[in-house]
Amino acid sequence: AQSVTQLGSHVSVSEGALVLLRCNYSSSVPPYLFWYVQYPNQGLQLLLKYTSAATLVKGINGFEAEFKKSETSFHLTKPSAHMSDAAEYFCAVSEGWAAGNKLTFGGGTRVLVKP
Amino acid sequence: EAGVAQSPRYKIIEKRQSVAFWCNPISGHATLYWYQQILGQGPKLLIQFQNNGVVDDSQLPKDRFSAERLKGVDSTLKIQPAKLEDSAVYLCASSLGTMETGELFFGEGSRLTVL
């Protein structure tokens, strides 16, 4: 069975500061990993995904994440926070096509950006 | 390209009443998912369809929830009778359903409040 743990349900950062959101996963097979962002009253939008190619993955809006197998982690970072980054972020794991490409999500981290 | 469409966006009902949500996936997407997102939690998979067949409904409370995807396109999720704990956002997602491990595309969700 697969699972995802996101450390910290709320993160507060100053505008221009580093954004770091932590995600650890468990999976019985090599995983596929995703970060989604959810703005208020909207659906989930894909930020980036890891599908066994490069371990450092770049996504939209300046975000990137690094897959570390030894640490079973897929932390999300952005060097400089912008007010528009205020949203909720979800890490998700999939065991691929053989498992129906189903996503299992973490509990989410809500990001607050202070001016 | 049109996204995943869901309706209604908001619904308020009293407990023991029934409700239905509709989803129209992206054209050509064979796989359709319904997720339940309770406030403060990550989305949880309820049911997955591949074309018009059910792939996984292990997390669907079958005593009150039902879903169908007639003709392999639109889908309807029904709750009858509703309980207070069913208050949540119901997210529909679709994907190509091919061997490629691609992203899931989410609709904006249907927010249900059960009083």
Image (cartoon, coloured by chain):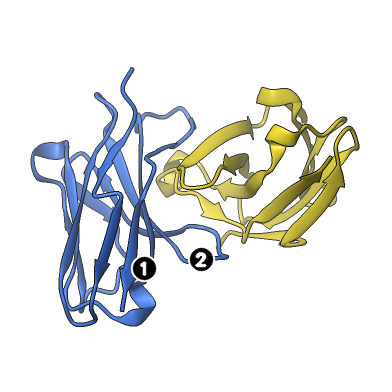
Chain colours: A yellow, B blue
Q: Residue at x 72, y 62 (%)?
A: A9
- Please give left or right for residue A36 compared with residue B102 in the image: right
Q: In this view, does A7 lie above or below A72?
A: below
Q: Which chain carries label 1?
A: B
Which residue sits at x=64%, y=45%? A87
Cβ atoms under marks 1 and 2 closer than 8 Å: no
Which is in the foreground here, disc 1 or disc 2? 2
Describe the element under mark 1 as helix, strand or loop. loop
- Left or right: B65 as drawn, with respect to A96: left
Q: Position of residue B112 (x, y in %)?
A: 32, 63
- Position of residue A18 measured from the top left corner of the image (x, y, whole percent): 89, 38
Residue under mark 2: which chain is it in? Answer: B
* Label tally: 2
State left or right for residue B47 relative to residue A20: left
Question: Which one is nearer the viewer's eye here, B76 or B54?
Answer: B76
Label 1, on which residue?
A: B59
Circle 2 residue: B39
Q: What residue type is labelled 1?
A: Gln
Disc ID at residue B88: none
